[in-house]
Every structure is written in structure tokens, then in C-alpha cells.
Image (spheres, rainbow, N blue to C red):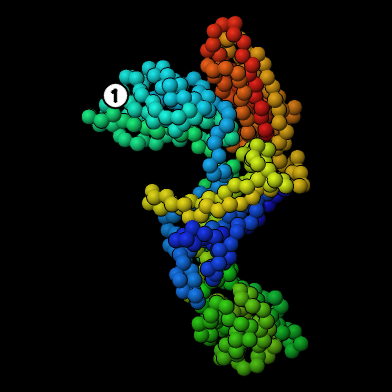
Amino acid sequence: MAGNPYDLDLVIAINGRKALTGFDSATETRVADFTLSDKVNLRVQPVRETGNGNRPNESIDISGVSLRAGLGFRGKAVSSGSFTLTFDSETTMALSYNATAADVAAALNALSSVGTDVGVSGNAGGPWTVTFGDLNDQNAISGDGTNLLPLADVSVVTQRTGTASLYEVQVIALKLAPVALATSFSSFPAAAGSVTELQAGAGANTPEIQRVSLDPAPIGGTFILTFGAASTEALPYDITAEDLQTELQDVSTIGSGNCTVTGESPTWDVTFGGLTGDQSNMSVDVSGLEVPVGLAGLLDLNTAGAFKALNDGVVTNGKVSMYLEVEMSEGGNRKTILQTPVDLLDDVLADDPSTQNSLTPLYLSDTLTGGGSKTVTISYGETISPAPTIDKIGYSFFFEGAGTDVRLTHIGTTSLTFTAKSARESGDDIQVGVEIRR
């Protein structure tokens, strides 16, 4: 059920590419399951294993580091739909997901910007290796996989850059898009501490009570408390209430027997039973504390990809198995620091229709006369404001026969519009349709 994000803490040993039970642990753990439509605040703490049993992990410097995290399938292939390729602002007709090398070559060579014909090799469904017919460096081919199922991207990489004596080689592949993806991460907060007055002292029967809090909870180091003009020694981050009481009573401005302490790290309550009247708050110096170092980002599971996974995937007892991957980038270098199996669960409680888009499928089909084009509009049957965006709509096109180009042209608050054009001979009817999950 959708709502406010909940925290999922991931301590990841980057040298072992595994999730740990905590910063002070060397034990690998299984990541908790995810549920359709939830919003998850991923708190990723990359660490390096030390091999020291007393201090099994150490924080790493994340200056200049960025993260991406996503849920998706591994080893699953695109199973239906179409895609297009673009070179120098010219776009091919739609190619079937299982296009042959000859199909891809014919589509690219039909573009005037390609120049001398390219050669294409590879299996049906790709990857396809494209060798340009002209020498020198070539612009990159790009692709649009909007109409592929499951949701997928068209990936193009340059295998060999063209020169005055070499022909450029680019490789095209269809890669499944993540079911859900988090790309915007921000650093964990720095060490901080506060002292709050819970009760103002007033006479002999109403002692002053102050609460000392370290937030975020530290994982090492020391802090110092000051009362008036005197301070404690450096105090361990995990000091017990009994030891903190002893340390405070050693402060000259407090004195022996004049305070008691309860609680445990990172929060303690100090009662000044031996001091009369309202007292000034203590101050806390946290410059010696070590706190978790990491990055947090939102993973939204209210996506068409998550819904489709629970309808098109191998579902057992209302859940589908997939993988959580976390990727770290620094200085242009990317490294997968975690890839681990997880389950995506169907939600039991329906989302609030006033705040969540319905996931009801809409389907419309029509007959298209060869050689012609048609614009088809599907009404949602309600107003969705603001209009759904591409990443919140799952849609797929179905058509019979090659040479049919189907494209989404408009997403509005009340309807979705696409155009279908047939390159087949006149009079040769084609059945074309669209299913959307909004």
C-alpha cells in the first residue's frame, strides 16, 4: 500500500558485494522483500571489510560518489513489441523485438543519413553488430524501446571507433528496463547532538531534567558534554548510563551525588537532583563522533513495471522473484556493489484511489487498411490530473504483420492517443491494438 516512504538500511561490503546485518557485523543477510506500490527510502552505507573481528568494517569516503539502485529481472528476454532506431535525426520504421540482422540492416540502410550501406550481423532478437560502410568516426545510433515488453531499453555501444582507415562498429542490444529505479541520492546527515530541557528545575522538589541526544546514532568515536564552565573528558559514543553519571559527577560545576542518568546510547536523560532551581542546558561537542557514511534515495514501486512484473512474471503465492542491484559510480567508473535476489509482493490493501492512479488495463483494437494510417484515442473514463507521465504508464502495442509503425503521440488527463501506419500493400488489412496500464 502506498504512503509515506519507509527506511530500508543497506550496509553493503563493497569488496565482498554483499549485504550485512549491520556496520559492526561480518554476517551476510538477505534483503527484505518489497511490496507493490510502496515507496522505500533506501539508505545505502557502503563499507569495506577489514578482517578485524573487533572492527569488521570501516566507512569509505563517498566524496564524488553517486549511486543507482533498481529492481529487475536477470536473464529474462524481451518477448513482444517493437522498437525503432535513430541515426542523425532520422528514425527507422518499427522493428519487431525478434528482428533478424537482415531486418535491422534494411531499416538502417533505408535512412538517407546512413550513406554507404551498413552491414549487420547477429541473431534474431539481437544483439546486432553494425559495421558502417563509410570510414571515420560516426555518430551514435540511438533507440526507442517504449513499445517493448517487458519494459526494455535499446542499448547501443561503440565497439570500435571509426578512423581514416577503419570502419566504425556499434552494437545494438535490447535490455530489460528495471521494474523500479532510484537515481537521486543525497548524503547521510553529519554528526549532530542536542540537549533538551524536559523539566525546568524549581525548588527542592522539582529537579532539572535534561535529555542528551546524538542524532544520527553514532557508530564510533567520542563526544564531550559541558555544564557551565567545566566539561567532561571525551566520552565513548556508547557509554552506559552508569558511566555517564560518574563522568558528570566528576565535572566541577555539577559535583558528586548531584545528578543521576538513565537511558542508553544515543539518548540519555540527566536528572540534576542535587542542584536547586532552573539550570542552563548542557552543550555537546560531537566533533569526535563517527556516524554512518552513506547515501539515501527514494525507490518508488508504484510503477507500471512493478505491476507488469506481478502479472507477466512467474508469480508464486502472490510474489515474483527478481534482483536488487546497487551501482556505485566515481570519476566516470561504474561498479556494481550489490546484486542480490529479492521478492516483489503483491499488495493486499488496495491503494487509495484519490491519491494513486488506477491500474485497470484498457484495451482497444481496430482494423488498419494497408498503406494508410490511423489515429486511435483511448479514453480513461475519468480525469487524471496531472496527466500521467511516461514512467507511470505501462503500455504495449499489438499488431499483426511486419511493416506496421505504432507510436504514442499524446498522454492527456482524459485520454491517450497513438498513431498506426502500415507500409503494407493497399487493401491488406492489419489488426492493431493497444493495452495500457495506468
Q: Position of residue 353 (x, y in %)?
A: 75, 40
Q: Quadrant of residue 60?
A: bottom left
The residue labelled by disc 1 is 134
In the rendered image, residue 139, in percent from the top left (x then y), is placed at: 35, 29
Q: Residue furthest front?
A: 123
Question: Which residue is more in the foreground, 28 or 437?
Answer: 28
* Residue 1 coordinates in the image, percent (x, y): 72, 48
- Name the quarter where the C terminus is drawn: top right
Left or right of residue 170: residue 289: right
Instruction: Name the residue rendered at 34%, 28% in the picture.
Output: 131
Q: Position of residue 100 (x, y in %)?
A: 46, 24
Residue 275 in sight from this viewpoint? no
Q: Is residue 408 visible?
A: yes
Give the residue drawn at x 54%, y 44%.
Answer: 74
Out of 251 and 243, give the one closest to the viewer.
243
Helix, strand or loop at label 1? It is: strand
Label 1: few (<14), some or many (≥20) within 10 Å? Answer: some
Q: In the figure, is residue 156 to the left or right of 367?
A: left
Q: Residue at x 55, y 47 (%)?
A: 70
- Residue found at x 65% / y 93%: 257
Residue type pointed to by label 1: Asp
Q: Is residue 259 above or below residue 428?
A: below
Query: Which of the pair 379/208 is nearer the observer?
Result: 379
**So how many labels did they put on this image?**
1
Q: Is residue 263 left or right of residue 99?
A: right
Residue closest to the far bottom: 256
Near-viewer residue (301 or 336): 336
Q: Is residue 150 above or below residue 335?
A: above
Q: Residue furthest left?
A: 165
| For residue 222, above or below residue 292 | below
